[in-house]
Image (cartoon, rainbow, N blue to C red):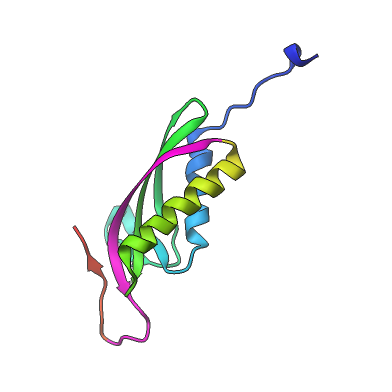
Amino acid sequence: MASSRGGLTIADRVIEKTASQILKALPGIGGTKSGLFGLGSSADLGSRPSVDVTLSGRSCTLDVELGLQYPSPITEATESVRRRLSTDVEALTGVAVHQVDITVKWLKPNASGSGQTVRNLQ
């Protein structure tokens, strides 16, 4: 009987990991690799971006901190990230994404640029 079946609860942490893995798979998007005790952190295109989730019933808000490979059009890149997260998170978890807030923390030049360093935006 349907009335005797249990329910499904998805934890915030599952959505966070799902969203950060989606972002890690995108080219030119990265996170911050932390050093010992948070000291010596560095921009890394191979790291997962940070995602915090606020879950409300069957919908959520995502707060994303990421870095971008430079040069790239920041507005286009962030809009693409919003669309991808909204579509993929809902498809994979069944939780609708109500809003995606994005903070671009750093820009990392292409590897072809010699002697260039990461520019932190804060």
Q: Please tell me whether residue 72 is drawn above or below residue 36 in the rendered image.
A: below
Q: Nearer the viewer, residue 26 or 35?
A: 26
Check residue 113 for magenta coloring.
yes
Q: From which residue to which does the magenta span run?
A: 95-114
If the image is split into quadrants, where does the N terminus sit?
A: top right
* Residue 59: % across, % down: 48, 32
For the stretch drawn in magenta, what is the main secondary structure?
strand
Check residue 109 for magenta coloring.
yes
Residue drawn at x 38%, y 62% as measured from the top left = 77
Q: Nearer the viewer, residue 81 or 49?
A: 81
Q: Nearer the viewer, residue 60 or 9?
A: 60
* Residue 58: % across, % down: 52, 29
Which quarter of the figure has residue 120?
bottom left
Q: Please tell me whether residue 17 is drawn above or below residue 75 in the rendered image.
A: above
If the image is split into quadrants, where does the C terminus sit?
A: bottom left
Q: Please tell me whether residue 82 is drawn above or below residue 107 in the rendered image.
A: above
The answer to whether one can see residue 33 in this image is: no
Residue drawn at x 56%, y 41% as measured from the top left = 90
Question: Farthest right residue?
Answer: 1
Residue drawn at x 52%, y 55% as measured from the top left = 22
The answer to whether one can see residue 39 in this image is: yes
* Residue 119: % across, % down: 23, 69
* Residue 114: % across, % down: 30, 87
Q: Please tell me whether residue 122 is drawn above or below residue 13 in the rendered image.
A: below
How many labels, in total? 0
